[in-house]
Image (spheres, rainbow, N blue to C red):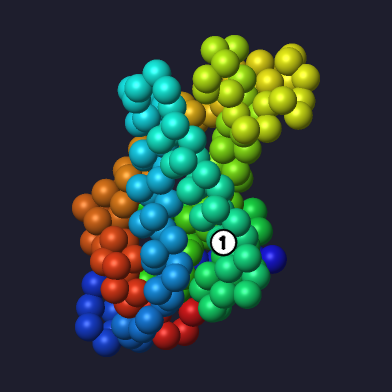
Amino acid sequence: MKDTGTHGAGPGGETARADNATVEIETIRVWDPLLRLFHWLLAIAVVGAWGLGKFGPNVMTLHFWFGYAVLGLLAFRLIWGFVGPEHARFGNFLYGPVSIGNYVIHMVRREPSYWRGHNPLGGFFVFVLLGVLAVHAGLGLIADPEDYVNAGPLAREVSTATSRTALAWHATLGWVVLGLVVLHVAAIGFYRKWKGEDLIRPMITGRKTVRKDR
C-alpha cells in the first residue's frame, strides 16, 4: 500500500512550479489501449443499464444484457488489475489514508497535479465504484420482481425473501451508482476548470503530462 504525500505543479512545458520549487514534467503514455477501451465501454454499459432500468420498456431484456456487459467488463478489470501494465494494476493506486488525506488537503490548489496514473483520491474512487457496480450487478442476477418476466437468471437459486431483498437493494444501489457517475463527471469538470488539468484526453490518447520525479 502506498503512503506517500502529494505536491501540486503549475502549468508549463518541460518545467513547472510546485510548492515553491521547479519540477520537471514530461508527457508519457500512461493508460494502455485495453484499459481505455474498458473505461469507455463500462461508461456506455452503466449508463445504458441504468437508463433502461429506470425508463426502459416493461420487458427488460436489454437492461439485463447491459448488466451482463457490466459484469463481463468488471471481470476483465479484476484480471487486468493484477496482470495489466503498471498503471492499470491495483497496487499502483492503492494508497493509505495519510496519502489520501494529504492529497485532499492540497487538491484545492489552482494548479495541475501532474500525477502519474490515478492520484490517491482517484484511486480510492476507482475501488469504490468498481465495488458498488459489482454488488449492484450481482444483486440483479438474483432479483425477482414477482412478474414472472424480469426475474434475474439466478433468482430461482435463492429463497423468495432473498430475491425480494436483492431487488430492493438493487434499486437503492441504482441511485448510488447514479450519484457516483455524477460525482465522477463533476470531478472531471473541477480538474478542467479549476486545476487546468484535462483528464479526458489522456483516457482517449493514453498520453498524460506528469512529473518526472513521481
* Position of residue 192 measured from the top left corner of the image (x, y, whole percent): 24, 56
Q: Note whether 70 is above or below 173 in the view shown.
A: below
* 17 and 44: which is toward the camera: 44
* 19 and 7: which is toward the camera: 7
Question: Which residue does the image show at 72% across and 25% down from the upper left?
Answer: 156
Q: Note whether 151 is above or below 35 in the view shown.
A: above
> Is residue 135 toward the left or the right of residue 17 in the image?
right
Question: Which residue does the image show at 69% across and 66% down from the upper left?
Answer: 1
Q: Residues within 10 Å of mark 1 (few under 14, many from 20)?
A: some
Residue lying furthest front in this view? Answer: 148
* 22 and 87: which is toward the camera: 87
> Is residue 141 toward the left or the right of residue 50 in the image?
right
Q: Note whether 12 is above or below 187 in the view shown.
A: below
* Position of residue 77 measured from the top left corner of the image (x, y, whole percent): 56, 61
Q: Quadrant of residue 196?
A: bottom left
* 161 and 92: which is toward the camera: 161
What number of labels is visible?
1
Q: Quadrant of residue 34?
A: bottom left
* Position of residue 206 measured from the top left corner of the image (x, y, whole percent): 35, 74
* Position of residue 20 measured from the top left corner of the image (x, y, whole percent): 36, 74
Question: Which residue does the image show at 32% across and 77% down from the upper left?
Answer: 207
Residue type at numbered disc 1: Phe
The residue singled out by tag 1 in the image is 76
Q: Secondary structure at mark 1?
A: helix
Q: Note whether 91 is above or below 46 in the view shown.
A: below
